[in-house]
């Protein structure tokens, strides 16, 4: 029987780095939309454990989805109020 190392944890769409001190860093592979960045979404997060960095990533992804949805809703409302631009 061979001892195989535990698989390296991964977060889809994010690059995961574990520092020499064991701190976890996650950096998004693709840029967030500008509207999300303007709303304060962070493309890089860090934490003491994999579970904590995973939760931080999930929080940033949710904030980005909410910012994009709010911007789309605002754009639709503007078109409905003023009509399409010609």
Image: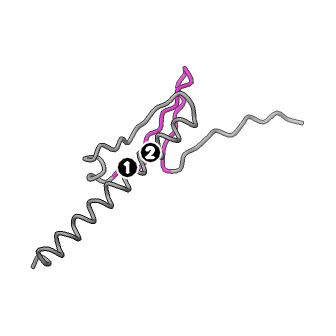
Which residue is denoted by mark 2 in the rendering? 59
Task: Classify the position of the C terminus by image quarter.
Answer: bottom left
Q: SS for tag 1? A: helix
Judging by the rendered image, the residue that carries numbered circle 1 is 63
Segment tinted magenta in the rendering = 13-32
Q: Camera-side residue: 51 or 24?
A: 51
Is residue 25 found left or right of 31 in the rendered image?
right
In this image, 44 relative to 73: left or right? Answer: right
**Quarter of the image containing the N terminus?**
top right
Is the C-beta separation of discs 2 and 1 under 8 Å? Answer: yes
Marks 2/1: CA–CA distance: 6 Å
Residue found at x 58% / y 43%: 10
In the displayed image of the protein, which residue is found farthest to the right?
1
Looking at the image, residue 32 sits to the left or right of residue 27; the answer is: left
Q: How many numbered marks have been drawn onto this rendered protein structure?
A: 2
Q: Residue at x 53, y 35 (%)?
A: 52
Give coordinates of residue 65: x percent, y percent.
Answer: 38, 56
């Amino acid at each position: 029987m061979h001892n195989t190392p535990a698989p390296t944890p991964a977060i889809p769409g994010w690059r995961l780095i574990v520092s020499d001190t064991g701190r976890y860093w996650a950096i998004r592979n693709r840029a967030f939309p500008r509207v999300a960045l303007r709303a304060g979404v962070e493309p890089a997060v860090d934490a003491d454990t994999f579970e904590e960095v995973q939760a931080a990533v999930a929080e940033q992804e949710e904030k980005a989805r909410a910012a994009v949805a709010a911007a789309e809703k605002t754009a639709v409302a503007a078109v409905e109020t003023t009509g399409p631009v010609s």
